[in-house]
Image (cartoon, coloured by chain):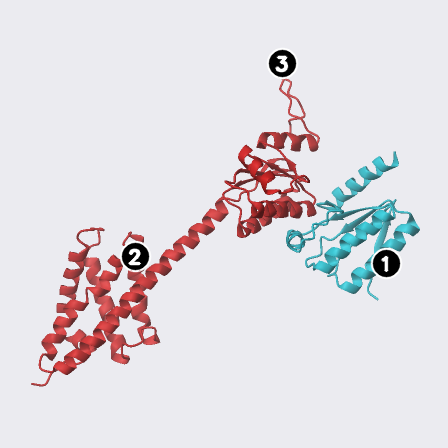
Chain colours: A red, B cyan
Amino acid sequence: MPTEASTLPEVLAKYESDLIDEWVRLQLAELSSSAHGLQERQIRDESRDFLNSLRHALETTNGRYISSPEFSRVRDNLEAICTSRLNQGFSPSEVATFVFSLKHPLFNRLRRELHNDMEMFGERTWEATMLIDKLGLYVTEVYQKERNQVIARQQQEMMELSTPVVQLWDGVLALPLIGTLDSARTQVVMQNLLEAIVQTGAEIAIIDITGVPTVDTLVAQHLLKTIAAARLMGADCIVSGIRPQIAQTIIHLGVDLTNVITKATLADAFAIALRRSGMAVVRARSNGATANSVEVV
Amino acid sequence: MERIPILKMGEFLLVTIQVDMHDRLVMTLQEDLTERIVKSRARGVLIDISALEIVDSFIGRMLANIAGMARLLDAETVLVGMQPAVAITLVELGLSLNGIRTALNVERGMDLLRSSADIGGQ
């Protein structure tokens, strides 16, 4: 008896709906424990699209290189499925299940078609295994890539969040630093500060390091760089928010901050900044006359 | 030959760098400026580099040198209008220009020169 469907795409075409049914059932069984609220309809649609694109790809090329252009639709499909499942909180193995659960139904169909020709059956099974394994690995890769993108985006957001420059007074800027200062962040801090100096015409910048957990020689060096750059733009820097622990560390490390004005608290630094710009904060008198020195012109 | 103009304003000299600096130009500026300081008996020099977008270590060092020479000739140098990118570059090059006074713009630079001239004159 001659077999009608002897190649993978032919098998896929012949048993399409049957295959999808079993595949979807398997997927649901695998996922039922975690119950991510994925609808059967959705899985069915995704599976059909994927199988279609896979069949088209296999009709034009062999399944040896899934990075070839013929497989671009398959890859796009997989990426879309991967992204949507990642966003729903699936684990990598759960995402990979989508591909691997195709194995069993597909092998069954192959066996039914090729039970007369063991050699052919072995070869096709091998082809299918290789293909599905590669696709499974690809899914994991995509998953990893998506994760890395999420991490990178969050890092970027954290970077932006943690380096604000605020204007405290006319001509006085504050730079509350939160988190460890590495070279990448120093660049951002420096740039933000210098741009703010240009924009506001500030003459004094207060760098508050209350939120910096530790100061080592590198952090101190970055701090000194920022101060030097601000000075080149004509603005003086005051470092504030030095905790006792940090003060001890700085001296133990032998970091020289003698050329920098340092204050224990932001309030002290602000008072110095005001005094330098010729202003004073005076308590308003009870008869309603306010001290004009607090008023900004 | 290309030269950077040096303007005299009262007892101060005003240098506005409007072109990209190259090594020859900054050498010429150094010679011209020291001569002018002596000739005009200037008390202060204001160098405006707001149009300067690129510096290298040589230009940075020359700026520091010019300030040092001016100080020897009893004129104070104020460097004004430095671009943020230039400031970052100089700091990364390790040139913090510690001997030079700086200001954000020409107006503030002139204020700085005047106030220090007042103190020095008294």
Q: Quadrant of residue A242?
A: top right
Residue B31, numbered label: 1
Query: From what the image shows, is residue A5 above or below residue B16?
Result: below
Other residues around mark 2 within 10 Å, as few (<14) / some (14–19) / many (≥20) = few
Q: Quadrant of residue A267?
A: top right
Residue labelled with disc 2? A84
Q: Amino acid at mark 3?
A: Asn
Residue A125: horizontal and vertical position, in percent?
18, 75
Q: Nearer the viewer, residue B106 or A98?
A: A98
In this picture, residue B45 sits left or right of residue A172: right
In this picture, residue A1 sits left or right of residue A91: left
Q: Amino acid at mark 1?
A: Glu
Q: Quadrant of the C terminus of chain A?
A: top right
Using the numbered discs, state the Cα–Cα distance from disc 1 to disc 3 in whole angstroms: 64 Å
- Residue A16 visible? The answer is no
Q: Chain of mark 2?
A: A
Residue A287, numbered label: 3
Other residues around mark 3 within 10 Å, as few (<14) / some (14–19) / many (≥20) = few
Q: Chain of mark 3?
A: A
Using the numbered discs, state the Cα–Cα distance from disc 1 to disc 2 in whole angstroms: 69 Å
